[in-house]
Amino acid sequence: MVLTAQELADLMPDATQLESNEPEMESSLHYAQLALLVTCLEWLWRDQGDFFIGANLTIYFSREQLKNRDYRGPDFFLVKNTEKHPRKSWVVWEEGGQYPDLIVELLSDSIARTDKNLKKELYQNRFRTPEYFWFSPENLQFEGFRLENRRYESIDANSDGLLWSDVLGLYLGIHDGKLRYFHETGELVLTPEEDAVRSQQQAKAAEARATRLAEQLRAMGIDPND
């Protein structure tokens, strides 16, 4: 009996239910850095619904890889032009063949060589991920690469030491010992908490300006309430 494509698909297991198989992160520094990258971008893009952020999540990219239990999961990855909803892992063949558009690895002494060599080659040659960054929360080593002519080329820093990301439309750089995002103007992309503090400061400043203006008007014999 010849099966139709749909009948064959119905017999296949639901790979979207594959659980992530990533080890624990190296330290609390790594956890804090990862949370910061995720939180800031989620907050900045809170009105968008067409992206997915993976945090220490396995990427399954072939059934052969799955059979060999050769799991690969970036610390942080971004996929654009996809549906924003929770996933247990990123399964390439269940996502229309999409690979990450940007990857960030958080280096540690035990895995730095793998991230700089084996994983870099995988992201360059198999994933074809347009941009790859690595950052060490311990010694602040930071580099970025952009795929050009099928090979990763180093991204040059600007005068402030920031690396531009075409994928994000933002800079990446170090601020207070953490890897952070920066707007094209060089302004820091804020966390929700930082944004709330800034809003409070702006409100207080506006109130102070209004108070000073009212005092000036009264000194001139003008009632500011009229």
Image (cartoon, rainbow, N blue to C red):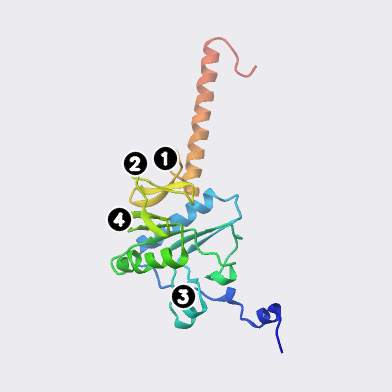
- Residue 165 drawn at (x, y percent): 44, 49
Amino acid of disc 3: Asn
- Residue underneath mark 4: 141
Disc 4 and disc 1 in contact, CB within 8 angstroms: no
Q: CA distance from mark 3 to mark 2?
A: 38 Å
Q: Which of marks 4 and 3 precedes in the sequence?
A: 3
Query: Element at badge 4?
Result: loop
Query: Element at badge 2?
Result: loop
Disc 1 and disc 2 in contact, CB within 8 angstroms: yes
Disc 3 and disc 2 in contact, CB within 8 angstroms: no
Q: Which of marks 4 and 2 precedes in the sequence?
A: 4
Q: For mark 2, does the 10 Å Cα neighbourhood hold few (<14), some (14 to 19), or many (20 or more) residues? A: few
- Residue underneath mark 3: 21
Q: CA distance from mark 1 to mark 3?
A: 37 Å
Q: For mark 4, does the 10 Å Cα neighbourhood hold few (<14), some (14 to 19), or many (20 or more) residues? A: few
Amino acid of disc 2: Asp
Q: Which of marks 1 and 4 precedes in the sequence?
A: 4
Q: Is residue 134 above or below residue 58?
A: above
Query: Element at badge 1?
Result: loop
Q: Is residue 200 above or below residue 39?
A: above
- Residue underneath mark 2: 160
Q: So how many labels did they put on this image?
A: 4
Q: Is residue 10 or residue 150 the one in the foreground?
A: 150
Residue at 33% x, 45% y: name it: 161
- Residue 117 drawn at (x, y percent): 33, 66
Direction bottom: furthest residue: 1
